Amino acid sequence: MERAVLKHISQTKMICKGDTVIVGVSGGADSMALLHILKEWRSQTYIKIIVAHVNHNLREEESDKDEILVRNYCKEHDIELRVLNARVREYCDFKGVSLEEGGRTIRYNFYNLIKKKHKSVKIATGHHKDDQVETVIMRIIRGTGINGLKGIEPIRKDGVVRPLLPVCKEDILGFCQEKRVPYRTDASNLEVDYHRNKIRHELIPILKRYNPSIEESISNLSKVAMEYEEHVKNDMDSLWLKYKDAKNIDYFALAQETPLMQKKLLLRKIKEICGNINFQHIHLDKAVEKIKDAQDTTWTISLPESYILRRSYDEITVEPEEANLGMPYFEYKMLPGKSYVFPKINAIVQARVEKNDKTQKKDEKQRGFVFDYDRINKIGEHITIRQRKPGDRIIPLGHNNKKKTKEILIDKKIPSVERDGILVFEVGGEIMWLAGVMPSDAFKVTKDTKKILRLALYKIQEEADA
């Protein structure tokens, strides 16, 4: 199996000599096998491995045991490790998505957070051939086009790679047994609770009665779809040059394209503006039908997550609906030195405690604001993250007296519709940071500061399938 994986890596050039490879490791057999192979391979290729583990907190003490296994393996083999403590169920309930979708979104945001701090980075995940088959079947069931039949891409343009795609689960389990690679069996994989697990344990065995080689047939279908989409993409890239710099799409130019290219152009424009929203092809079908009628000069089509596709005479635009900015008050508490996922603010917050090394040159890859941790530690144990409240005041950096946060936001010319979304970080009832806008002078780093707290706030971006 190891030879098949390394051959796949070499042929596709998905990982090159000297790359930094962030390996998403859950503690299960797939990711542990991938980590073990890359660990053995690193001395030949001088790759740097960083393990990223997300504790999903879904299985109580079992989730902690997963984390302990990953920590122990990394410590034993001298591998850098980053861990995110995530409230996945709370995030999914708040966003109205499945545990699988929400967990994937959080994981990939965590990987990309780490990626920003390094150069020549690849993100390696443990997806294998069985995952590929399940993904294609799942997309067929819920409705998909040829692009969906591609399944899991071996190499994504954002640097995500899948070295294990040529091998199946049975191969991986055999490899772990032969090489004595430790792993934990995720109890949720044995329960037929999730949609994917129903496909795995119920549907695929039925399909095998009709075609014992169903996995190979679907895998080949996926390869054909990839080849077809690559050809269409080349045509699309040439056509996109006419539209990519325009804020709006010219209706009459779009109407001259084939229905396939109309859909491709609209889809790319929607993704450019909205990101990876929970989009369905029925929206594109409606748009193509509307485009056919040149006399219907004004129409709108509702898209997911409060966006609309609008025709206004000779222009087609993608724009947000008027937002409902009202949000119930929330408040979170966090301990310095950890990373957290906060669903209601759709963000990952990093709070790292570091020595105040005055001789160290500034690293451009270091993100976030720094604060005097010595003072923070004296005032309170927890940092509170909350919405702004009327009357909030902060001592602006470089000043001696407190000023209302509202006045600061007005001075900074931040639009009123955005002000309610600005977060407050406080300790012991004293505001230390008006997030992304102004740190407090009371917590500034001085020559006497021994330890600093580095705070960074990252908005969670929705993750596309696979």
Image (cartoon, rainbow, N blue to C red):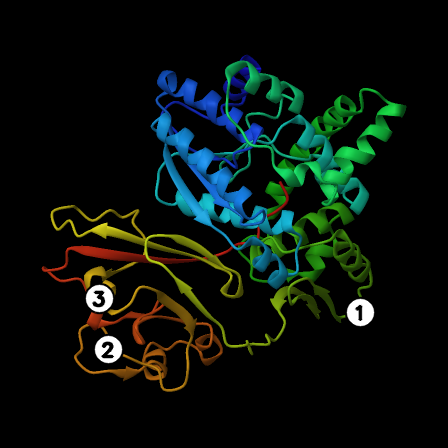
| For residue 131, above or below residue 45 | below
Give the mark nearest the N terminus, 3 or 1.
1
Judged left or right of residue 145, residue 23 is left
Q: Secondary structure at mark 3?
A: helix
Q: Which of these two is toward me, 115 or 268?
A: 115
Rounded to the nearest whole Å, what is the CA distance between mark 3 and mark 1?
67 Å
**At 72% across and 51% down in the image, what residue appears?**
262
- The Cα atoms of the two marked residues, 1 and 2, are separated by 56 Å
Kindly identify the amino acid type of the residue bearing the numbered disc 2: Ile
Decide: is 18 above or below 432.
above
3 or 2: tag closer to the N-terminus: 3
Q: Which mark is residue 296?
A: 1
Residue highlighted by disc 2: 395
Task: Give the labeled residue for mark 3.
Answer: 378
Residue sitting at 18 percent across and 77 percent down? 399
Closer to the eye: label 1 or 2 = 2
Mark 3 or 2: in front is 3
Q: Is residue 382 left or right of residue 204?
A: left
At 38% from the left and 68% from the top, the residue drawn is 384
- Image quadrant for the N terminus? top right
Which numbered tag is attached to residue 189?
none
Mark 2 closeness class: few <14, some 14–19, many ≥20 residues within 10 Å: many
Q: Quadrant of residue 440?
A: bottom left
